[in-house]
Amino acid sequence: MELGDPLGLHRVIPEADPSAPLPLPQRASRLDNDPQKRFASEIVVEVSTLNIDAASFRQMEEEAGDPQGVGAIVLRTIGHRGKQHNPVTGSGGMLLGRVSWVGEAVSERAAVGDRIATLASLSLTPLHVEKVLAVRAASAQVDVEGTAFIFATAPFAKLPKDLNERLALAILDVAGAAPQVARLVAPKQTVLVLGAGGKSGILCCAEARRRLGKSGRLVGIESHPTYAKELNSLGLCDMVVEADARDVVAVRDRVAELTEGEGADVTFSCVNTPGCEMGAILATKDRGKVYFFAMSTSFTACALGAEGVGADVDLLIGNGFAEGHADHTLALVREDNRLRSLFERRYT
């Protein structure tokens, strides 16, 4: 049996130009998703649910004109690319399933029968789907019958016994957000979260409140009225503002009003729609930090936009992985009964 490359290069289908260098799986146009092939450095998973990232699900929902049409688009994408790698947003998501086979080179990582959630993006995960069983728009999850392949370097988490699997999947999808907040937020700061009522936004607010304690200020901006109301009920934010983050001037002015003209020390953008980059930048004080967790972000718009308005801020690219991030975020939800109850209502 072939070993296979730890980074998954053995599943990359070369480009038409034979002289072009072989890209890594995430950048590749197509992956070999043949469910019959086995490599000693892979783990094979029977897939039951795809958790599509919010920006990708919203784009597909708008394209289809109906949430149920998302399933057909997912099948089309996987058929063309061998992975769920949205060609419009460039993003993927993650999956839930059962380990069905473990290569001898990675035998210490998992055992047959383990229930796991991948922590690497679907945009780099070889995936073969036979059938879509259900589309659940509220949680951006798609139930399927399929097979996926985990490379030797790709992270995953074994599902906890004390949490509903769908709830755990929803949490693990954005598990990288809270640890990044923990690294960036300090007491007495002013913290702003855009898209604060969504899944990653609420986790950012919960971690920011934990780091701030009773000091500093935490401002959440959310456009969806129900989500804004639910966020307010958690008591995490000092102020919850119902506003559209795409209205960058309104965001700037409202944050300036709430912070006596100072702006935020740290801003986290967790929105699921494009066009919000400058709102985050303009609402942040000079030498502040703006962390873009959302996959809807245009990093060109960030860099050129900040330059164009003379904003001297540090622009940080969101990274869905941080050491220990799965345990960190699951513990955060376990510790707050109100947060756990809200997520159970939404995602199970």
Image (cartoon, helix red, strand yellow):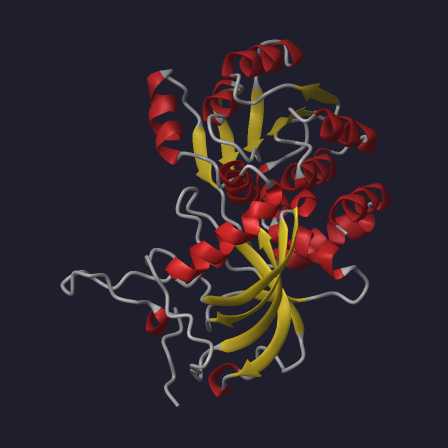
Q: Tell me the quarter of the picture where residue 54 sits.
A: top right
Q: Is residue 226 left or right of residue 9?
A: right
Q: Locate residue 18: give its quadrant.
A: bottom left
Classify 241 as above or below 345: above
Residue at image position (33%, 59%) is 28
User: Residue at the bottom extreme?
Assistant: 1
From the viewer's side, name the closer residue of 164 and 317: 164
Residue under the point 78% across and 26% down: 229
Q: How many marks?
A: 0
Q: Which residue is found at the position 44% from the left and 83% from the top?
A: 38
Residue under the image location 52 percent in, 77 percent down: 43
Q: Please state the horizontal and vertical placement of residue 252, each as a whole percent of the image.
A: 54, 14
Q: As displayed, is residue 153 above or below residue 179?
A: below
Left or right? Give the position of 331 relative to 117. right
Residue sitting nearer the eye, 71 or 150? 71
Residue 46, horizontal then vertical, whole percent: 59, 73
Q: Position of residue 276 (x, y in %)?
A: 50, 26
Q: Is residue 299 visible?
A: yes
Q: Is residue 147 left or right of residue 4?
A: right
Q: Position of residue 66 (x, y in %)?
A: 59, 40
